[in-house]
């Protein structure tokens, strides 16, 4: 069962939170999403925020919740995240998990960086006879290749394909696929989505392990930045970098070449 709580003033939404309540008593905000938690859209009196939080907790307890788990969006998405997390901690929520996301922030900075990167890679692309396509999703064949390539590398498949198909069908204008090709053969794919109107989130990719082209991953990053500029978003979210719960230092270093900041995404839990 899904529930939504909203804080309204003169019919304007000041804050909101969505949660799925499972039969076992877990209340999760939002399951199978990059993050959920509280969204505060404008300056709200701190006492009002606390009252809203308390009322939400009481409501969920009355509905049978035994614990609440929520993942707050990094503060680049929601400027009031730090304040919300402060009140979560004061209310008894415990820190459950932290992921560190790498970002490229700033429209002008992204545009300037993109010019430099395109100039840097243009000759290499021609030399290797490579092409890169960016567009809306027309079919889902690339998902099969992503799965096969990741399995061949021994990586765990974490995405829910049925859920992804449903989301793309519901919001086709938000999803983009980037493909790197050598002649007519695809050697790499990446999937990106506009989670909000001012952001682009990169969350799924794979490179053919059989390819000898070392530029494929870098070209995906460059064209993610290109897509972010074309979509006129304020920032590009390159996601977290972990393997089996441990920091993937090589991936963090790789992404650092295409990012200019990092922010934490924190999951909180309150048990009754």
Image (cartoon, grey):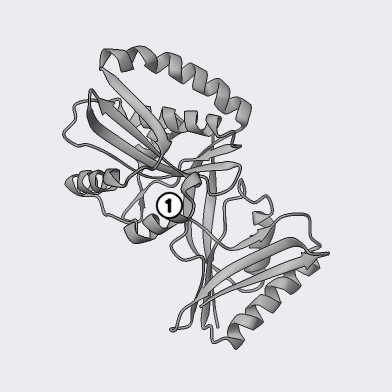
| Residue 265 x %, y % | 52, 54
Q: Which quarter shows the C terminus? A: bottom right
Residue at position x 46%, y 30% in the image? 258
| Of 196 and 71, the residue lying toward us | 196
Q: Residue furthest right?
A: 10
Q: Which residue is mark 1?
A: 168
Mark 1 nearby-residue class (10 Å; few <14, some 14–19, many ≥20):
some
- x 58%, y 48%: residue: 196
Q: Of 169 and 221, which appears nearest the observer? A: 169
Q: Position of residue 152 (x, y in %)?
A: 17, 46
Please state the horizontal and vertical placement of residue 235, each as a whole percent of the image: 57, 38
User: Which quarter of the picture shows residue 182?
Assistant: top left
Q: Position of residue 160 (x, y in %)?
A: 34, 59
- Please tell me whether residue 11 is drawn above or below residue 225 in the rendered image: below
136 vs 7, nearest the viewer = 136
Residue 221 left/right relative to 140? right
Q: Is residue 145 left or right of residue 122?
A: left
Q: Residue at x 55, y 46 (%)?
A: 263
Q: Tell me the residue at 51%/18% (across/down).
A: 115
* Towards the viewer: 241 or 59: 59
Identify the secondary structure beneath mark 1. Answer: helix
Q: From this view, report whether residue 182 is shown above or below residue 64.
A: above
Q: Would you place residue 102 above or below residue 1 in this image?
A: above
Rendering quarter of residue 268: bottom right
């Amino acid at each position: 069962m899904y529930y939504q709580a909203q804080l309204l003033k003169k019919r304007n939404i000041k804050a909101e939170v969505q949660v799925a309540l499972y039969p076992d008593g877990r209340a999760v905000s939002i399951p199978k999403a990059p993050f959920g938690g509280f969204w505060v859209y404008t300056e709200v009196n701190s006492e009002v925020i606390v009252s809203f939080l308390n009322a939400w907790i009481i409501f969920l307890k009355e509905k049978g919740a035994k614990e609440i788990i929520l993942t707050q969006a990094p503060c680049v998405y929601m400027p009031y995240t730090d304040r919300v997390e402060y009140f979560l901690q004061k209310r008894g929520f415990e820190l459950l998990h932290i992921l560190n996301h790498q970002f490229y922030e700033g429209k002008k900075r992204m545009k300037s960086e993109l010019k430099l990167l395109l100039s840097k890679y243009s000759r290499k692309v021609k030399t290797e006879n490579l092409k890169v396509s960016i567009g809306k999703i027309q079919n889902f064949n690339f998902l099969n290749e992503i799965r096969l390539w990741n399995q061949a590398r021994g990586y765990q498949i974490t995405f829910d394909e049925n859920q992804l198909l449903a989301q793309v069908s519901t919001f086709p204008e938000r999803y983009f696929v980037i493909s790197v090709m050598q002649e007519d053969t695809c050697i790499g794919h990446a999937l990106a989505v506009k989670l909000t109107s001012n952001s682009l989130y990169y969350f799924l990719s794979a490179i053919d392990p059989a390819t000898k082209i070392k530029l494929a991953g870098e070209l995906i990053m460059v064209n993610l930045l290109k897509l972010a500029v074309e979509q006129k978003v304020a920032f590009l979210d390159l996601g977290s970098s972990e393997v089996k719960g441990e920091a993937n230092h090589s991936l963090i270093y790789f992404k650092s070449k295409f990012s200019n900041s990092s922010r934490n995404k924190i999951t909180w839990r309150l048990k009754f």
